[in-house]
């Protein structure tokens, strides 16, 4: 059986496998075939993993896809840390290069969420994780501008000094 998934742009994906295929204790092989903008094909080596205690029965789990991105540029923020807290349950996720992470939650419910990244304001939200449901959570966080970054280009540099001098000269 071959399952094809097109337009993969992230390093993690969710695949729905046919329920009746008898997946328990089975070897699964996978590889990535890519086509560049010029039509050239490239294949990775073939990888294998073995299923263990696979069950198609419904569970209380939820699968959550988390995205963290810059509120202005809309660019992903790799390395951002998203912490989910619910009663005694705490889950820390560090965003991958794509600013994305897929996590399985065993305990549905209301979670307090804290999103942190170097150079950004910490953001706190509340979300409900619903059992037996795949959810996508998008979090945008705001860049923490440094003192002296007058032109808001995320650098304290000569341009800011010139802008400061211009403002001072206008006051006279």
Image (tube, grey):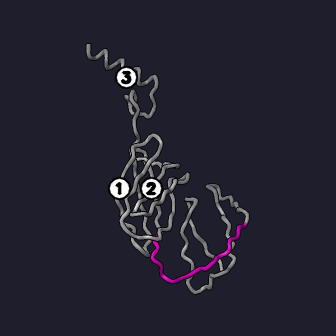
Residue drawn at (70%, 60%) of the image: 42
Q: Indicate yes or no whether the magenta region holds residue 139.
A: no
Of residues 163 and 138, the one nearer the viewer is: 138
Label 1 to label 2, Cα distance in Å?
A: 10 Å
Residue drawn at (39%, 71%) of the image: 130
**Badge nearest the viewer, 3 or 2:** 2
Packing grade of label 2 (10 A; few <14, some 14-19, many >=20) is: some
The label shown at residue 125 is 1
Query: Which residue occupies the extreme left position in the image?
Result: 172
Of residues 124 and 21, the one nearer the viewer is: 124
Which span is picked out in magenta? 46-62
**Badge nearest the viewer, 1 or 3:** 1
Packing grade of label 3 (10 A; few <14, some 14-19, many >=20) is: some
Q: Could you tell me which secondary element the residue under label 1 belongs to?
A: strand
Quadrant placement of the C terminus: top left
Query: Which residue occupies the extreme front position in the image?
Result: 88
Quadrant for residue 25, please give it: bottom right
Q: How many numbered badges does the structure rendering display?
A: 3
Asked if marks 1 and 3 touch (Cβ < 8 Å), the reply is no
Q: Which residue is mark 2?
A: 83
**Badge nearest the viewer, 1 or 2:** 2
The label shown at residue 171 is none
The label shown at residue 163 is 3
């Amino acid at each position: 059986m071959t399952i094809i998934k097109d337009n993969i742009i992230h390093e993690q994906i969710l695949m729905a496998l046919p329920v009746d295929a008898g997946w328990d204790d089975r070897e699964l092989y996978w590889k990535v075939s890519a086509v560049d903008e010029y039509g050239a094909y490239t294949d990775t080596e073939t990888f294998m993993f073995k299923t263990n205690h696979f069950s198609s029965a419904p569970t209380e789990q939820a699968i959550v896809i988390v995205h963290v991105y810059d509120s202005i540029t809309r660019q992903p923020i790799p390395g951002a840390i998203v912490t989910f807290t619910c009663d005694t349950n705490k889950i820390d996720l560090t965003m991958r290069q794509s600013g994305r992470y897929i996590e399985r939650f065993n305990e549905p419910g209301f979670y307090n969420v804290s999103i942190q990244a170097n150079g950004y304001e910490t953001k706190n939200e509340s979300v409900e994780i619903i059992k037996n449901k795949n959810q996508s959570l998008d979090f945008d966080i705001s860049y923490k501008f440094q003192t002296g970054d007058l032109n808001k280009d995320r650098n304290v540099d000569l341009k800011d000094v010139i802008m400061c001098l211009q403002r001072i000269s206008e006051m006279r």
